[in-house]
Amino acid sequence: MSRRPEPAQAQDPAGHRLSPTRTLDIDPLIEDPATRIVVCCGSGGVGKTTTAAALGLRAAERGRKVVVLTIDPARRLAQSMGIDSLDNTPRRVKGIDDSAGGELHAMMLDMKRTFDEIVEGHADPDRATAILGNPFYQSLSAGFAGTQEYMAMEKLGQLRSRDEWDLIVVDTPPSRSALDFLDAPKRLGSFLDGKLIRVLLAPAKVGGRAGMKFLNVGMSMMTGALGKVLGGQLLKDMQTFVAAMDSMFGGFRTRADATYKLLQAPGTAFLVVAAPERDALREAAYFVERLAAEEMPLAGLVLNRVHGSGADRLSAERALAAAENLEDSRIVDQEDGKAGLRNSPETYGSSDPSGSSPASGTPASDVPGTGSPATADDTEGASTKGTDAEADTDRSVDRLTAGLLRLHAERMRLLSREQRTRDRFTALHPEVAVTEVAALPGDVHDLAGLRDIGDRLAAHRPELPETT
């Protein structure tokens, strides 16, 4: 008795057998009361903001009290939610289906305002005023590398500590690298604990004039070099800032560590968002590996802006062959190829310039049954005009059809590239569940569009076919 053949398995470029892609189930994730934080991460330009907003809306319409924290400066989230503008304060989104008892709030991170709130909350009024007015602080709070990512984590910690929302959905900053979000606390902590800060802090530790004397005597070479590099006024501003911030440095480190632990907690879920492109999925693979190394809970991958086709049984090769057939029918349509074309009576049957019959040489007007010459000419003229018009119409249809077939061939080639790119990722990380979201013809600009994206996220419908 013969064995029933096993289904064909996909092959990756290295020759390994690919297992079927695991499916990411979105609804159980966002409906689970134990899920308190969902972090949408990934490289820039892959649709993180739209994904975060769609998840927040879907969770709210299923009974959760949700706040979406975005760091998108384009303000598309506010527009799609029908809000004039977003700021550092969560705002209620109107127009959602709240029949299940849910609520949706949205806010956009104001990096500098968040930094100011930290200062105001952890320093006495006089010291807070001195810090907020310091030129070096103003520069640091507005544009220091990593400050935006750190403040995003700071704001996440603030929202979670208030315990006002069932679910917090975070849209991570549009950084050069998706890993910047996780690295920011360490980077800022390293800066605050660095040698430069300790040097600048030394005078304040000693105090007053004695401190300045100590700085001038004990570190004259150091400050001389810093003064040349930074400028005397900037160095003075930095010293004043560091002296005022001294009591707060430990708080930055403590809060950063607490938020980092919050991201590792069981109630947190990371969703890596990527487009089916090589660079975006390479970045996603790095992030998956980093999350595993940091023991942070990964829910799965959202493969966004995937192209599909309802006619994928027509391959690119067959579509191109059909297009060539239509564009050059003289050769391709002949059953016997070029030989059939040479022997065609339509091509050679009336080549005699005298108008004689090819068989007898007799003029057509003298052949019995052809009618009088005048009648034959009139009939032939009308027939020729009708035939020419029909031929022009046929050629126009053929050109249009050939163009559509070539567009289809391009779409099938794109699908093939996206499929290969996805399969490389799943071969490297078969443990990662994936959900695919189709590319839309335009931007999402209202709640209905976000609801549609949410439906697609939870549809379990693969846009790309499994490799067979």
Image (cartoon, grey):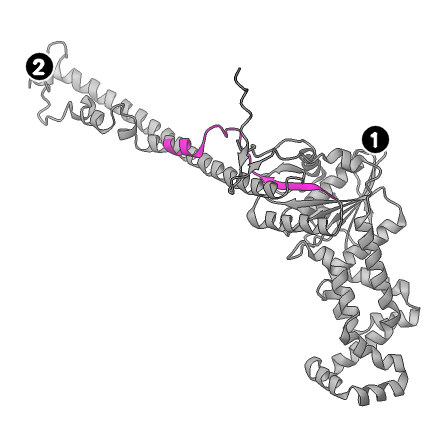
Q: Residue at x 87, y 79 (%)?
A: 204
Q: Which residue has dot 2 on it?
A: 366
Q: Residue at x 8, y 14 (%)?
A: 366
The number of numbered discs placed on residues in the rendered structure image is 2
Corner quadrant of residue 352? top left
Q: Secondary structure at mark 1?
A: loop
Farthest residue, direction top:
369
Q: Which amino acid, mark 2? A: Asp
Q: Is residue 318 magenta?
A: yes
Q: Position of residue 292 (x, y in %)?
A: 71, 48
Q: Residue at x 33, y 30 (%)?
A: 325
Corner quadrant of residue 61? top right
Front-most of 313 and 64?
313
Q: Position of residue 393 (x, y in %)?
A: 35, 27
Farthest residue, direction left:
361
Q: Is residue 452 above or below residue 222?
A: above
Q: Which mark is residue 99?
A: 1
Q: Position of residue 258 (x, y in %)?
A: 84, 56
Q: Is residue 87 above or below residue 81?
A: below
What stretch of residues is rendered in magenta? 298-321
In the shown orientation, is residue 429 left or right of residue 258? left
Q: Are marks 2 and 1 in contact (CB under 8 Å)?
A: no
Please indicate, yes or no, whether residue 29 appears anywhere in the rendered image.
Answer: yes
Q: Position of residue 335 (x, y in %)?
A: 27, 23
| Neighbours of disc 2 within 10 Å: few (<14), some (14-19), many (20+) | few
Say whether disc 2 or disc 1 marks the residue closer to the N-terminus: 1
In the shown orientation, is residue 342 left or right of residue 24? left
State how far apart marks 2 and 1 are (Cα): 90 Å
Front-most of 428 and 340?
428
Q: Which amino acid, mark 1? A: Ser
